[in-house]
Image: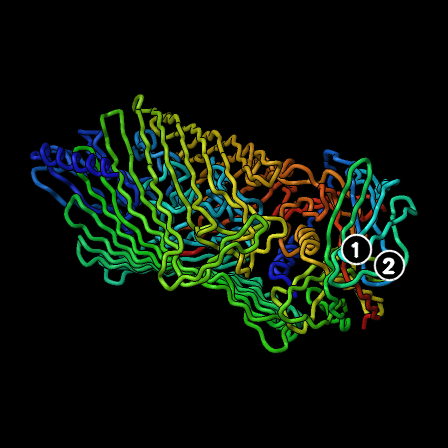
Amino acid sequence: MKSFKYYIFCTVLGLATSCTKVVDLKLNNNAGILVIEGNITNIRGPQYIKLHQNVSFSNTNTYPPVTGATVSVSDDKGNNYDFTEGPAGTYSITAMAGTPGYTYSMKVITNGKIYTANSVMPAQVILDSLTSKASEFSSGKNQRDIVVHYQDPPGVANQYRFVMYINSVQVNGTFAYNDDFIDGRYVNLEVLENDIKIYPGDTAIVEMQCIDKPVYTYWYTLMQQQQNGPGGGVTPSNPPTNITPVALGYFSAHTTQTTTITVK
Amino acid sequence: MSKFLLFILFLFAANQAFSQKKFTISGTIKDEATGEQLIGASVIIKELPKNGTATNSYGFYSLTTQEGDYTLSVTYIGYETLIKQVSLHQNQTINLGLSPKSELKEVVISANKPNNDNVASPQMGEEKLNMSQINNIPVVLGEKDILKTIALLPGVKAAGEGNTGFYVRGGTSDQNLILLDEATVYNASHLFGFFSTFNSDAVKDVTLYKGGMPAAYGGRLSSVLDIKMNEGNNQDYTVQGGLGLISSRIKVEGPIVKDKGSFMISARRTYLDLFFKASSDSTLRGSSIYFYDINAKANYHFDDNNVLYISGYFGKDVLLLKNTFGTNWGNATGTIRFNHIFNNRLFSNTSLVFSNYNYAIQDFESTDFFKATSQITDVNFKEDLQYSMGNNHNLKFGLNILHHTIAPGNITTNATSSFNPVSIEQRFGFENAAYISDDWRVSDKITFLYGLRLSGMFLLGPGTFSTYDAAGDVLTLATYSSGATVKDYFNLEPRFSSSYQLNDQSSIKASYNRNTQNIHLLSNSTSSTPTDLYVMSSNNIKPEIADQVSTGYFRNFNENTIEFSAEVYYKWLQNQIDYKNGAQLLINQDVESQLVYGIGRAYGIELFLKKKYGRFNGWIGYTLSRTEDKFAAINNGNYFPATQDRTHDLSIVGIYQLSKRWTLSSTFIYATGNAVTYPTGKYQIGGLTTFSYSARNSYRLPAANRLDIGATLEGKEHKKYHSSWTFGVYNLYGHWDPYIITFRNSKTVPNTTEAVQTSIFPTPIPSVTWNFKF
């Protein structure tokens, strides 16, 4: 499911990409804001909620962990799970599995404030297979695109997020889709990206997540803000979080399934 | 309203009572060589220098004054002044033909006695462009362009490099009404905005109203760009054209019946794709990128009082990637007009106008197959009347019935496709208006131009119409039958301009006007794409409203050859539209749930110094301005700079005729960068570096500045044909004007981030075009 604007923007970008340079900008700093990234999956194993602070743009990409927080998750069936810290800023519980259809609530107490968020784990949609095909926008160079195949369930709203790794390196890009145009179809979805060039022989790993609507809105907003995202680069802002009071980040209860192929 | 009409009636009565000894001269002013009617030619009685008028869009004028013997003087820039003795003892029709001063160089006129229209007229915020100046101004890749030229005027700002969109006095680009022979042109750009849809060969007259908008125009908040096509030569057949680096153009015109009727056909096409066809790469060979457009017009003069015009425009952009994907988009317009002169005081024009904009996007691959289409179609009936009352009143009144059909989106697919077919309900509506205005010369010093426009918007069924809560979920849903009114809006739009002439050389002017807009472009993209989506005012979207006051000082120097003006404006905007986070606009039945509404304000000062005559001519325009928006959900509900806010905007245009054959030209621009949102921090989410943001639009792109030069070499004179060469260099000193700045992980220093600027034309771009005429 390629976005219409994607095509057009790629063409414009094609005209323009050769003329770029790194510039030095003076940016204001608004650092030290709490970032919460909470995930509950349907796979039994450790579940993680990570807390850190944002840093100013000119810093290195190392983020101070937020330690000493009280973190717990409960579900709407009365189960409560306490998370323990280790390593610093990473809070986890071992051997827990989420159940599709349950609503999970996260509670984080740090620095005297209580942050909460709810997320419903959707029913799982099975990732059928992964394939590769000749890349449309750079044919002749033997480049490949990865295609995800799955059957979208008819009559219900589904939202998906994909995470892709090429030779164990995560592709820099957000891939979030809903089924507005594909409801009930057998879907062949190209994971379009221009971060890592993919060639035959590479190992491609794709994780498929089924996410709820607020989490989809969170990822889709991030995706729109990418220069070649479906918005063609909309005015950026912090994506709408499901955490109250407002913090950076999200809490997502989702199903997950990972498939690996060797690119042909 | 009724008081206003009573007032007009009173003026009528007064006119009848005191006009016994007055007579009227009327007629049409044309170019003698081609039969083209001249728009805005000034007709003056020498003995009564204050008693003058100008020809309307169809070259018609009407002057009423006391009986007597007079000297009539007709002037038009680039033409020989014509003097005619008139013995006015009865109403008379006087049709006149002016001869061009010089066939080659319209601007280089010194013998004409320039008039002081710009000082004397109450009209404010009006800019007229001279086609020969447009032809001389250098532009990128040598493709001369009306929209890029008007962006050099004060108060008008280019949307950015590689974009023909323009912002007038803080308005967004969809707040400009662009008319080609009265037909709305919805998307005025080719090739993602690198070129405009107007082929300047086919254009006769360009007028931009950025304030003080006459009551005859409405439907958009910021400006009207009124473009009139050439009529075609009704004396001789001529062929002219040009071969450029990226495109070629040709124009054929000639008489249908000599002196009675003529036609004009003008076409152009780019030929980048022809190089694809020669490529060894099979994918490239099967791919294509081009645009073309055709302008055609014909007219027939049944007699002096009845003229029929038919004109049309058709343009298309095509982009095709072999076996993969294709898109095309374009405008089509058609206009049928009938001029009728009832008597020498009453002129009427009846128009039937068609306009369409559509785009299609298609994916050819079997697993992804889809075809998405969208279009907007207008049918417009207009009746415009002009009544010269004498007694220093000139009335204009008329009505307008405009029907919109909007098909927001339609997707067709096949069995193997990943996509479902979707059809978004079509929307129907009427935008109707009636107006009246009076140009009243109160005294030698004071002139008023005042009027009223009543606009009525009717959103009609059939269809299902929803209202939404704050979260964007459907609140109510109602189904309407065909023709049922879903929502209507009426707006009264007063328009008022006045001038007080201090002396022959200077005046002060003031104006107030209200404009409303009932058709809105939805786009949350920062780039120019053809996937324009229009919606009408509805049960969710209220009409946009702008109130503008402006005042100005106008001063001419050196016998009216140098014009100076300073205008100050302040604009209040209501019901402005922005988008929710993650808004999905395209092919969305509930698109109106994705919108948020706010207010705006824009103010500024525009300085303009213009030398219209002489071997050296040109202008300097400078604007100091501010444009701000206010939305409850953005920036804590505080005002923030709109994207199109531009603090400083400077344009310098110079054209110099070096010799009989060489003309040199140059433009320089400097503009504050767009207001943009930069990160104020970063964090990690989903394993990736993600940026955090604070206030909206609190940063600026670096200022743009650029120098372009051009030169035209006229070929040696031949009896049978004429040719010329146009040379140009765009961005002479290779400045990196910013197109966009993005942020990413550094490619050179691990574990850090960097800002990257993209520029479209960071190097000098030379161009050459060969023009011919025979």
Left/right placement of residue B485 relative to residue A112 reads left
Instruction: Give the image location of residue B348, x and y in percent.
Output: 22, 50
Q: Residues within 10 Å of mark 2 (few under 14, many from 20)?
A: some
**Could you confirm whether marks 1 and 2 are on the same chain?**
yes
Image point (52%, 44%), residue name: B597
Q: Is residue B267 in view?
A: no
Quarter of image, res B639:
top right
Mark nearest the camera among 1 and 2 is 1
Image point (81%, 70%), residue name: A263
Left/right placement of residue B453 relative to residue B680 reads left
Q: Chain of mark 2?
A: A
Q: CA distance from mark 1 to mark 2?
A: 15 Å
Image point (76%, 60%), residue name: A254
User: Which residue occupies the foreground of this view, A214 or B214?
Assistant: A214
Q: How many marks?
A: 2
B11 shown above or below B535: above
Please give the label number shown on residue A78.
Answer: 1
Q: Is residue A35 in view?
A: yes
Question: Helix or strand or loop: what does disc 2 sit on?
Answer: strand
Quarter of image, res B85:
top left
Quarter of image, res B736:
top right
Left/right placement of residue A44 relative to residue A239 reads right
Tell me which amino acid carries mark 1. Gly
Q: Chain of mark 1?
A: A
Instruction: Give the image location of residue B281, x and y in percent.
Output: 68, 70
Residue where numbered disc 2 is placed: A96
Instruction: Give the image location of residue B585, x and y in percent.
Output: 56, 56
